Amino acid sequence: MIALLRRDLALALRSGGGFGLALAFFLILVVLIPFGVGPEGELLSRIAPGVLWVGALLACLLSLDRIFQLDFEDGSLDLLACSPLPLEGVALIKALTHWLTTGLPLAIAAPFLGIFLNLPQDAIFWLVSSLAVGTPALSLIGAFGAALTIGLKRGGLLISLLVLPLYVPTLIFGADCVRRGAEGLAATTPLLFLAGITAGCIAALPFATAAALRANLR
Amino acid sequence: MSLWEYANPKKFMATSSAVLPWVAILSAACLFVGLIWGFFFTPDDFRQGSTVKIIYLHVPSALMAINAWLMMLVCSLIWLVRRHHVSALAARAAAPVGMTMTLIALATGAIWGQPMWGTYWAWDPRLTSFLILFLFYLGYIALWEAIENPDTAADLTSVLCLVGSVFALLSRYAVNFWNQGLHQGASLSLDKEENVADVFYFPLLVSIAGFVLFFLALVLIRTRTEIRARRISALHARRQAQANTTHSALPGE
């Protein structure tokens, strides 16, 4: 599993595009919002939690189809399916790689983008922690969507249709956590809900992903 | 005699063709009686006026929108565990019907909401979770349409249905957390504490029965169509295979 993780990380880092692209997209999105809604600081700081979370979600979505597609095309996924490592483990590692290359950088970059959107200082902590806790769920759900659409020629559009409704609970709790943090309310409850969703996804979704992969490889 | 006999397509086709006319007639009768009774022979509500009568479309369609997904869930489980093709095809057949029911519930709700709440749409928990349910239906149908191999498609959509059910339920309660709503609580329940008044209740029950039977009839028709389509493609494949073998045999003669 460690070897697979290192291989996937190396591929993601060296192939270019995949790694920085999500971050750049996030940056552009956040920069575009003030042009759309106007530069008033008060308005921006009110919508900042939602914008940052939706932005992170869309940035995650951007790189989903790369999770399995390349391995499926060059046949390495067949080899992985034949290897002693269970397919559930492969699914988990793939999601972990996706999180390390998109979710984690997004969580680290988010405070700086929060400054652009005039996010209150107190909320920065909640922003980082909610993104750090919530984005693993996004990666796991995304890996499931990617496994469903792996054999399709034009999976990109379909994957967003399948995955975005599944993102709703994560988005609700994530954005609510930051909003409460920004208003100075207690924000631990949504954060705990978010952690619960992530834990449930880690426990259950690799099985669904592996089932979808098996159906596609058969 | 067990339920699993109907996993045999031939048996299913025979029984469903016998049952279908009765279901259709009964559903038409129930809908006719329920809607006519509801629309013309019930008094206006003292606060809502005659707009209350949209309840005879709104409540049954909302009920069926959820139950259709539940039926798809059961069918998907049966397909994954016992691999009966009829089950997978029934799930496929139910999806567009369920989606239409969701759409009817949303549309009638909007039409009802305009005079009552002063707005067609509010981000109320119930309304929002119905919109999310609609998106789930869309994704499910799109996945069925996108995959060519029927068995792979059945597998993948079944897994999506299972995962989607969990997340739909999660969203249903997450939106409660997110916003408090305008929509009233449940107005129909088996313990009759908080039910609507009897004048409205009985025609409503009849039109709910009509919607259930209507759904059943549509699903039966659509499942029969799917089975026939599957047979046609099997026949095509067989003829293709025969043609190929005769062609390849020719040069060797």
Image (tube, rainbow, N blue to C red):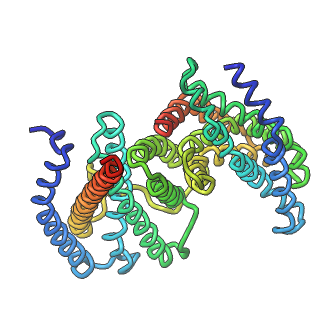
Query: Horizontally, is A185 left or right of A93 in the view?
Result: right
Residue A112, placed above or below residue A30: above
Q: Nearer the viewer, residue B97 or A200?
A: B97
Give residue A123's quadrant in the image: top right
Point 35% across, 62% down: residue: B97
Question: What is the tally of numbered marks visible in this picture?
Answer: 0
Residue B21 in the image: x percent, y percent? 13, 66
Residue A202 in the image: x percent, y percent? 60, 29
Residue B198 at least partly seen: no
Q: Nearer the viewer, residue B206 or A216?
A: A216
Q: Quadrant of the N terminus of chain A?
A: top right
Residue A192, placed above or below residue A85: below
Extreme-front residue of the structure: B253
Q: Nearer the viewer, residue B139 or A135?
A: B139
Point 45% across, 43% down: residue: B156
Residue B4 at least partly seen: yes
Query: Horizontally, is B87 left or right of A46 in the view?
Result: left
Point 84% across, 42% down: residue: A124
Q: Nearer the viewer, residue A99 or B115?
A: A99
Point 54% across, 24% down: residue: A82
Residue B103 in the image: x percent, y percent? 43, 67
Query: Horizontally, is B199 left or right of A70 in the view?
Result: left
Residue A50 in the image: x percent, y percent? 74, 53
Give residue A10's quadrant in the image: top right
